[in-house]
């Protein structure tokens, strides 16, 4: 029989897993909307498996959704064969869900033309929606699969720079769009290729951004109590001496989320209006309560 503590622990773990996969599914749907409703109808090719699917659709007039599904399934098999357990079920889950969803949309909601007559507007959505979703997936320790799986295999079995390899693959696919479709589509695809990485990097940095506080205080105990008891973070402190008046002060170092930063700043002003506060943006915090290696 399970004890109450063990049962509660398993329940919390199950809830966390369900919540994580709900977020993965929701984010994947955003990715699918960007690809199917904006990328495929306009023949935008920014690289990756979806870019290959668009190119093959343009040459052989086969279903882009089915091509995307077949290539992703083949890459998933390669991932499990060459990477084993390190491959990650989250990436496999996202890859299958996205590929199947695109194929189902193609069957039940076929797109014979773009949604609008504004290609720039459609290009923006074709970049932003998949880019935003991909960044969130990376932040949840997953990816959309596709060429990311090839990158993981290259990383494991060679010292070849992955970023360069993937860039050249994406570039070749984008150049092919100029020949398979027309120069306008090719130029739009080039613009998408250049903007895609910027969007992903910006979203990842924004999602991980925290506030780093350096607080110089003569009444540190209430501030540290608030950080621990109300914000559920910890802090590091040490004694320091002012250079001008040679007075003793306590320096408190802590990191909180953006929403908590406003609360902490206001609380410090309430506890000790004369405290000196330095607040710095940081997008790479690694440790207990934040990211792990």
Image (cartoon, helix red, strand yellow):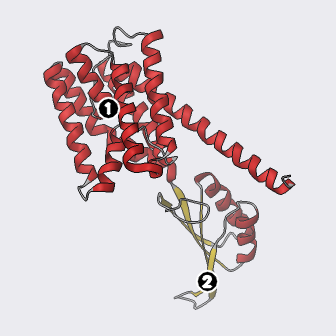
Residue 49, label in figure:
1
Q: CA distance from mark 2 to mark 1?
A: 53 Å
Side of 166 where 282 appears, left or right: right
Side of 219 where 261 appears, left or right: left
Answer above or below: position of 30 versus 236: above
Residue 203 percent coordinates (x, y): 44, 44
Residue 147 percent coordinates (x, y): 32, 39
Side of 106 where 228 appears, left or right: right
Mark 1 neighbour class, 10 Å CA radius: few under 14, some 14 to 19, many 20 or more:
many
Image-quadrant location for residue 290? bottom right
> Residue at image x 43%, y 26%?
99
**Residue 122 visible:** no
Answer above or below: position of 21 versus 181: below
The mark lying in front, picked from 2 and 1, is: 1
Could you say whether the residue bearing mark 1 is in a helix, strand or loop?
helix
View extreme (bottom): residue: 246
Which of the two residues, 13 or 224, is positioned nearer the viewer here? 13
Residue 252 percent coordinates (x, y): 62, 75
Residue 125 percent coordinates (x, y): 39, 27
What number of labels is visible?
2
Which of the two residues, 123 or 86, is positioned nearer the viewer here? 86
Q: Which residue is mark 2?
A: 238
Answer above or below: position of 117 versus 2: above
Sequence-first tag of 2 and 1: 1
Could you say whether the residue bearing mark 2 is in a helix, strand or loop?
strand
Which of the two residues, 28 or 241, is positioned nearer the viewer here? 28
**Residue 240 visible:** yes
> Residue at image x 61%, y 57%?
261
Side of 81 where 255 appears, left or right: right
């Amino acid at each position: 029989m399970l004890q109450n503590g063990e049962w509660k622990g398993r329940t919390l773990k199950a809830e966390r897993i369900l919540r994580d996969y709900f977020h993965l599914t929701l984010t994947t749907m955003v990715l699918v909307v960007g690809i199917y409703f904006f990328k495929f109808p306009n023949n935008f090719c920014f690289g990756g498996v979806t870019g290959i699917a668009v190119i093959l659709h343009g040459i052989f007039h086969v279903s882009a959704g089915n091509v995307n599904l077949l290539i992703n399934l083949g890459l998933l098999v390669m991932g499990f064969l060459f990477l084993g357990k390190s491959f990650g079920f989250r990436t496999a889950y996202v890859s299958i869900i996205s590929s199947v969803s695109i194929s189902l949309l193609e069957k039940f909601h076929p797109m014979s033309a773009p949604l609008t007559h504004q290609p720039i507007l459609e290009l923006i959505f074709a970049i932003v929606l998949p880019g935003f979703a991909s960044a969130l997936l990376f932040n949840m320790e997953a990816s959309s699969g596709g060429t990311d799986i090839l990158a993981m295999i290259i990383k494991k079995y060679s010292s070849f720079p992955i970023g360069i390899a993937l860039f050249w693959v994406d570039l070749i696919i984008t150049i092919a769009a100029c020949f398979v479709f027309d120069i306008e589509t090719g130029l739009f695809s080039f613009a998408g290729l250049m903007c895609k990485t910027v969007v992903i990097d910006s979203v990842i940095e924004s999602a991980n951004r925290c506030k780093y506080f350096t607080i110089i205080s003569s009444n540190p105990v209430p501030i540290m109590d608030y950080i621990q008891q109300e914000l559920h973070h910890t802090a590091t402190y040490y004694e320091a001496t002012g250079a001008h008046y040679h007075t003793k002060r306590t320096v408190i170092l802590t990191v909180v989320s953006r929403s908590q930063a406003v609360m902490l700043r206001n609380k410090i002003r309430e506890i000790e209006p004369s405290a000196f506060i330095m607040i710095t943006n940081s997008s790479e915090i690694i440790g207990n309560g934040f990211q792990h290696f």
